[in-house]
Image (cartoon, grey):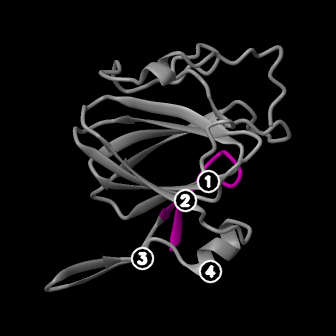
Amino acid sequence: MKIIKKSIIPGCFLFSHPNFHDERGFLMKVFSSYFIKKYLKNKRIMQVNYSLTKKQYSIRGLHYQNPLPEFKIVKCLDGKVFDVVLDLRKKSKTFLKYEKFILDSEASHLLLIPENCAHGYQTLKKNTKILYLHTNNYDPNFSRGINFKDPNLNINWPKKPSKISVKDSKLDFINIKKFKGL
């Protein structure tokens, strides 16, 4: 795997991964033990999720877990998304800053999201499929989120959302004076 973009957010990278093609199709190398050792600090993949978002311009996120932080590896399998990573680490030089990425199934890309960063995306095509690898299991008691339209973040989403879950639409804005980070 090769880093094709180092984010402003420390520990966040966009990788290209090898695809091996022949007359039958292709084989895609998504990750390896080397990748885990070097970038995930030897943590194990504990959970793999697959999502289908039917409607174009739907938004999922911004989600994180606390106190069970996790690395996430995100791969767009079909479709295209505008992906956002928000740094919530109090000692980070990019605390409360975000970076955006376009993940497209046409490209051989993986996005590595570090622990204690929130993640969300807007689908740019209908029937978008995403694969997530997590270094922690989901625990509803520690599931957290930030409202996608938080004016403190000023995220420029590409389009007005066509669909968002009730849960995500009710997420709070960050209280800048009280939120000290993770």
CA distance separating discs 4 and 3 = 12 Å
Q: Secondary structure at mark 3?
A: loop
Secondary structure beneath disc 2?
A: strand
Q: Which mark is residue 137?
A: 1
**Could you say where residue 12 lies in the image, as x and y percent from the top left?**
63, 53
Instruction: Evaluate if marks 2 and 4 touch, with contact meaning CB atoms under 8 Å apart.
Output: no
Which of label 2 and label 4 is nearer to you?
2
Image point (28%, 45%), residue name: 128
Q: Is residue 102 left or right of residue 116?
A: left
**Which mark is on residue 34?**
4
Q: Residue at x 24, y 39 (%)?
A: 125
Residue 92 magenta-highlighted: no
Q: In the figure, 33 relative to 173: above or below? A: below
Label 3 vs label 2: CA separation?
Answer: 18 Å
Q: Which mark is residue 29?
A: 3
Query: Along the line of sight, which residue is nearer the eye, 41 or 145?
Result: 145
Front disc: 1 or 3 = 1
Left or right: where 125 falls relative to 24: right
- Please give the range of residues in magenta: 1-15
Residue 1 position, x and y percent, is 50, 74
The residue carrying mark 2 is 47
Which callout, 3 or 2, points to the residue nearer the camera? 2
The amino acid marked with disc number 1 is Asn
Q: For the point 39% across and 49% down, which residue is it?
A: 103
Q: Which tag, 1 or 2, sits closer to the chain's start?
A: 2
